[in-house]
Amino acid sequence: MVLKRKIMDRLIRWKNDPDRRCLLLQGARQVGKTYIVDQFAREQYEHYVSINFEYDARYRDLFDGDNNVDALVERMKLSIPGSRFVPGKTLLFLDEIQSCPNARTALKFFALDGRYDVIASGSLLGINYEEVSSFPAGYVDRETMYSLDFEEFLWAMGQDSSTIAYLRGLYDRREQVPAAVNDSMMDNLRQYIAVGGMPRVVQSFADDHDYDRVLRIQRALLDDYRDDIAKYAEGREKAKARACFDSIPKQLAKDSKRFTYGLVEKGSGARKYAGSLQWLYDAGIINFCHCLNNPELPFEGNADNAKFKVYMRDTGLLMAMLEDGAQRDVIVGKNLGIYKGAIYENIIGDMFAKQGKRLYYFEKNSRLEMDFFIRYEDVATAVEVKASANRQAKSMRSLIDNYGVKRGIKLSPGNVGSAGDAVEVMPLWMAMFL
């Protein structure tokens, strides 16, 4: 089974845009960038030339000389047997371009020339902008690719577009979900929490539903991330980035899930570790969720960059960082205490981030905290995430009564409803539509 990915539609829109420039496809390792570009090229182009600068370092030498496009093309034709460059009909794919800074510089000249479509792919790991002699600002379109979102996961599990349309209709009409449907969707969401969205993991699960194999693959991916930290982080950042990465499960175990540098190293602070966290973010491994000074729009103008939570970008990988048995505990809905709430917060944050939302939360004097704030229908909307079904919304009511918040959404395993004026209640899985 071929995994269906939404990024394919965006690639096709790019190809059909008469003003297209070279495309830089970014994203963490193992999210499927190379696979999707190969598939796109086979379906949309007559000729396809692919260069992977990590697989064969010799190709880096092709970009050491003249940046004239004709000269570059001739060098590639001589070095890559069977390669054909036909204006308007050839896609050139420069994979792992972070390993060849000169190739990144050459994107400007391909964009100005315009005869050939060019996609460059870089896993954010190891991209060192200082090594690029002339960054092609203004000559590159950008797309970021993530692991599979929840809708793509449902497709992989055999759900078709008509089923998604039915579910969206229930959401749009704020209609009560039939109990059997809600139970089934919560089962799907718990599977998605345990499996996550990394393509290799999802493919394995779709083939045989073997959670033990899923866990082995996930932990191998985590080891790959740790190896990449050792390979690409510079100097002292290696140990610091690894320490921040390994602290994430402990950070989320606290009542207040705000990132605390003391959990990385006792007595440490932002001066020592902030750069390492930013490195993990740039590598596509974590999401930041910043605290708002005031729960109002514009969020970025009200955000406190010194106060934040850190979530894993793929919740399945977070689960794999826990001990054996955690997957099954989530699947059967076992009470995991405070950590169950952390897992559900992570999945909702993951879902929001994959929709292109920046993540924000609000807290006041440790007595009032709201998990997320999103711009929803142009209103600052509080979002509360609950792992158990109840319609109490004390924090939400306090925000509405005392802080001018006009709208709230409570996500829980329960059904569609309300918790008083201005507070809607929705099943957790409906976050995919927010």
Image (cartoon, rainbow, N blue to C red):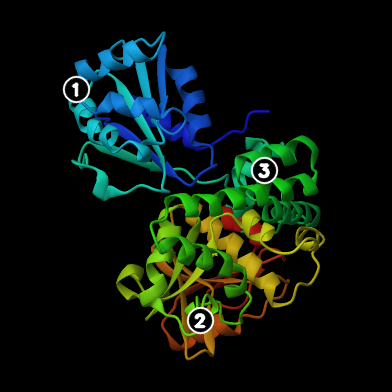
Is disc 3 placed on a helix, strand or loop? helix
Disc 1 residue type?
Answer: Asp
| In the image, residue 404 above or below residue 357 | below
| In the image, residue 139 above or below residue 189 | above
Q: What whole-number distance in Å separates the C-alpha atoms at marks 2 and 3?
A: 33 Å
Q: Is residue 136 left or right of residue 195?
A: left
Q: Residues within 10 Å of mark 2 (few under 14, many from 20)?
A: few
Q: Which residue is mark 3?
A: 201
Label disc, if present, on residue 262 of the rendered structure: 2
Q: Which residue is mark 1?
A: 113
Of tags 2 and 3, the one toward the viewer is: 2
Of tags 2 and 1, the one toward the viewer is: 2
Is disc 2 placed on a helix, strand or loop? helix
Q: Position of residue 332 (x, y in %)?
A: 82, 61
Q: Position of residue 278 (x, y in %)?
A: 40, 63
Q: Are marks 3 and 1 in contact (CB under 8 Å)?
A: no
Disc 3 residue type?
Answer: Val
Label disc, if present, on residue 80 of the rendered structure: none
Mark with earlier residue (3, 1): 1
* Residue at position x 64%, y 52% in the image: 170
Mark with earlier residue (2, 3): 3
Q: Are marks 2 and 3 in contact (CB under 8 Å)?
A: no
Nearest the eye: 302 or 404:
302
Disc 2 residue type?
Answer: Gly
